[in-house]
Image (cartoon, rainbow, N blue to C red):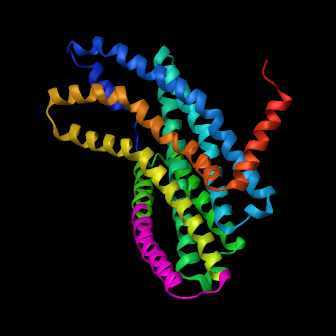
Amino acid sequence: MADLSGSNVTSRVSNSTTGDETSLTIPVRVSLIFNITVNTITCPLTFLLNVLVIMAVKRRPRLQSKANILLACLAVTDALSGLVVQPAFIMWMTSKLLDMPGKSTIIAFVNSSARATFVCSSLHLMLVTFERLIAIKFTMQYPNIVTTQNIKVVVTSFWITTFSSEVTRFARDQYVFSNVLAALVLTSCVVFIAFSYVILYHETRRQEKKIKSQQLPKEEVERFAKESKALKTTVYVVGAVVLCFVPAAALLLISSLLKVSGAWMQIRLSSLYYVFTPAIRTCGLLNSLLNPLIYCWRQREMRKFVLSRFSAVHEVHPTA
């Protein structure tokens, strides 16, 4: 993940002699307090909901389809976001707000952990999309390609690749390698998912026309309806990712403008850049909370499991 901390930009603002620095102190503090509050509230929910999704897939046989197993694997990365990335981000914003020492170390950890979970999530999204592509486009080959063993091998390789790149970055100070890997994964993810969904759209339309024009067996119609519902779930998940990371893409565009603009414009834009950076990071982190909500919305069995666990917690710890 790109460095959205704004540390370089902030130093330029602090070194400037304009009168805007003092006036921006209050907006910056308000931004930090607001984002600390939002992340503090959503952090435990993100972790808990994703853990419940994993538990639901593991304990309910009706939920143990290959598509749901892959969504559970994605939930692992989202749970880590709530367990590691968000708390570290809260710690960095708090240290910034209170002017505590060690801010550079904390933000380095935030960037590294956020990049690792982002790269791993992107790879999992590609795998989820690939599973839907095989299920709908290459139905006959599906049982031989999408197996539990193959899923374990691929997911394990994703985690090894992701974290080995971050370890290499810290051990050998190879920032370029880590950033290039993240950029390649993101680009590949976008291209693959876009290409796959074009194919899936045409295939589903063809199947729908075939069902309307021909008397197909009831089993085949039910299978297609089930696969289409799973496809819509993945579409919503991908859509949530795009929605949450649009602000980050806009931030990268602003960063590019800063490099080519003059000194006065750099100061003006960099001030706004630093004020809105925490909110943009928060928006990206909230994607890990949206995903389990989408799973529960789309799947009744999973929703029942999650709600039953919340009810059990409420019965054990009743409110006054």
Residue 284 counted in the magenta span: no
Q: Which residues are magenta?
A: 190-219
Q: Nearer the viewer, residue 91 or 279?
A: 279
Q: Nearer the viewer, residue 124 or 92?
A: 124
Q: Is residue 155 above or below residue 113?
A: below
Q: Residue at x 54, y 54 (%)?
A: 121
Specify the quadrant that holds the C terminus. top right
Q: Going by the image, does 56 lie left or right of 89?
A: right
Q: Position of residue 208 (x, y in %)?
A: 50, 78
Q: Is residue 257 above or below residue 160?
A: above
Seen as rendered, the residue at the extreme right is 316
Q: Nearer the viewer, residue 32 or 292?
A: 292
Q: Is residue 126 above or below residue 149?
A: above
Assign the magenta stretch its main secondary structure.
helix
Residue 206 counted in the magenta span: yes
- Which image quadrant for residue 264? top left
